[in-house]
Amino acid sequence: MSVKQRCLLALLLGILLPVSAHAETYRCVSLDYPPLIYKDSDHQVKGFAVELVSAVFKNLGHNLQVEIYPWARSLEMVRSGTRDCVFTIFHSHEREQFLDFSGESIIPQMVYFYTKKDTGVVFKGDFSSLEGMRIGTVRKISYGARFEEARPRLQIDEAYELEQSMKKLLIGRIDVFPSNYYSAAYLLKLPRNKEMAEKIVQIPVAIDVVPSYLGFSKVKKLDALRGGFDREFRNFVSSGQYRDLLVKYELESSPELVRFLQQKH
């Protein structure tokens, strides 16, 4: 092959294979957040959000590695730039200081209070009704703007994970705990939590419906990746693959999710 032919071949490969020529492996972090993010019995990271984000990165020609850590540590890792991204995460002005958020919300999260059956606890949107009650939260987790605005006036008892809050509720150390619907429903369906499921109820009025995002470390300057993610995410939704994942993970098609999908089309 002549020098001229080799140059032409290299040019054609550059035109035809731009994605693979620039393929990267990105490292994302999250917390144990089933059914969105969790480790299976083989210690593989799985979940609705993991498959979703991995598929979008694959469509961009990139690989994704997802690691699970306590939430505070995950946030510190993207703040320092030792990891590239974090999900699923609520937007806040504080987090804007170290994260560039995806333009597209990847899933809406419905946040409710949970309490023991027959306690008479009532919440209709007014946080003053919880005065004097002990509220179990997970460390560094945001529950949406309405809860966070009320947080300084509430009696908070922190745990490192949601299941700890559930156990605290059963032994009387707290009176209520907030959670996104997906995680609470998933944990209460597990066979090991049968007693919890029989004694814990969801208070019907939602605290908030909060969009959640993929956050990119500002230190890593990943603006091009963020733009590509938004574009391919929209394609993923419009192709029907997003709805297929919802079915796979048995995530209820709530009115909030129906509206979310309608807005994406």
Image (spheres, rainbow, N blue to C red):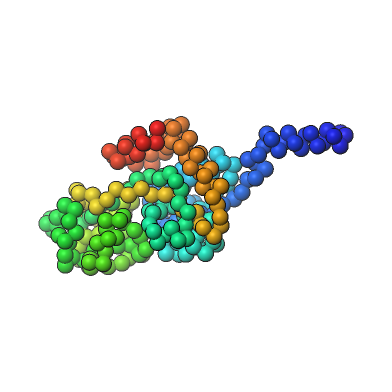
Left-right relation of 245 to 116:
right
Q: Is residue 12 above or below residue 89?
A: above
Between 137 and 11, the one nearer to me in the picture: 11
Farthest-out residue, right: 2
Q: Nearer the viewer, residue 57 or 4?
A: 4
- Residue at 24%, 62% in the rendered image: 150
Q: Residue at x 41, y 51 (%)?
A: 88
Residue 123: % across, % down: 17, 54
Q: Residue at x 51, y 57 (%)?
A: 217
Q: Position of residue 166 (x, y in %)?
A: 27, 59
Q: Is residue 206 left or right of residue 265?
A: left
Is residue 42 visible in the rendered image? The answer is no
Quadrant in which residue 22 is drawn = top right
- Name the spot of residue 51 as percent of width and height, x first: 47, 44
Residue shown at the point (32%, 36%) measured from the top left? 258
On screen, residue 185 versus residue 124, left or right, reads right
- Report how many numbered discs are placed on residues in the image: 0
* Image quadrant where one finds the C terminus: top left
174, above or below 12, in the image = below
